[in-house]
Amino acid sequence: MPLDPHTPVTSEVEVVHVGQEPPDSWAAAVYLCGPTPTDPAEPSWRPGAVDALRSAWCGAGRLVVFVPEPVPGGGYPAYGEQIVWEEDAMRRSDVILFWIPRDMATLPGLVSNIKWGSWCDSGRAVLGAPPEAERMAYLLHFADALGVPVERTPTGAAEAAMRAVGPGHARSGGERSVPLTVWRTVPFRTWYAARREAGDRLLDARVEWYAPAAGPDGAAAWLLTVTVAPADGSGPAVGRLLAAQGQGMLM
């Protein structure tokens, strides 16, 4: 729902570490994706990225930053549980911020390659890598081909992520699973307004496919799987929504 213009709002940033439950509502969410140093003496890049996001966030409401590292002094969950947490956090995020300072001897970032391949064409990716990062040509090629913002410093990448987020939009419950790239589109807003008027409640959503607008006058296309609790109290209903370019909403 849109924020009430008469309700005072403040900007805040909440960091959610691996294994933690996210808050019930937010205006924007960013996932920090990239390699994590295995040497305790090597500092992680993520605290600096969080600070940069905190400085750049000026939207009304809460910015959630998903960090796939434990709280200081804490430990990682079981590997399978960590993967589930990471995948769920990424699908709920409005931007997947990749920072890949690849060093094949100390920080190869091989898992980051897989995650980049999964999200590079989502319309939500930002790619950051210092100029000296090794073996990045393939990733940079597809970033250019797909129009993914590319930055060379963590601060630049954070600022690019905030430009993509813009002012954000308040979402709670199942609404948090609809990224801003879909939430802002006319077909989704029209469908969701009708569902809310009918008394239905959105429980969950998953973007199955996304294609950005072909030009300044075009519209994004997407396929969304939604789980809705009907107003009549019957069991959750799962459906698919397709917003095709030039065709509005198909169900």
Image: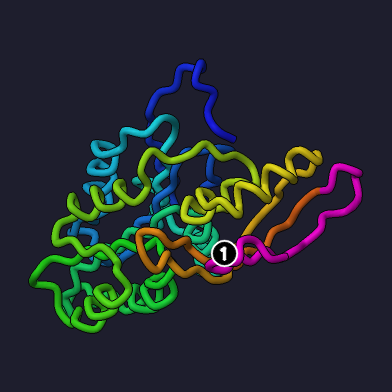
Q: Image quarter for residue 142?
A: bottom left
Q: Image quarter for residue 39?
A: bottom left
* Residue 242 among those drawn in magenta: yes
Give the left or right position of residue 96, taking residue 81 as reference: left
Judging from the image, the colouring scheme is rainbow
Residue at 64 percent of width and 48 percent of height: 190
Q: Position of residue 141 (x, y in %)?
A: 23, 80
Report the span colored magenta.
230-251
Give the left or right position of residue 133, taking residue 200 as reference: left
Residue at 22 percent of width and 76 percent of height: 140
Give the left or right position of residue 123, taking residue 82 as reference: left
Q: Position of residue 228 (x, y in %)?
A: 76, 52
Q: Image quarter for residue 80?
A: bottom right
Q: Quadrant of the N terminus?
A: top right
Q: Quadrant of the C terminus?
A: bottom right
Q: Position of residue 22 (x, y in %)?
A: 53, 44
Rendered view: 84 above or below 180: below
* Residue 118 among those drawn in magenta: no
Q: Position of residue 32 (x, y in %)?
A: 35, 56
Residue at 58 percent of width and 70 percent of height: 208
Q: Label 1 belongs to which residue? A: 207
Q: Nearer the viewer, residue 94 or 44?
A: 94
Give the left or right position of residue 15, taking residue 135 as reference: right
Amino acid type, callout 1:
Val
Q: Nearer the viewer, residue 200 or 114?
A: 200
Residue at 18 percent of width and 61 percent of height: 151
Q: Residue furthest left?
A: 132
Q: Nearer the viewer, residue 36 or 6?
A: 6
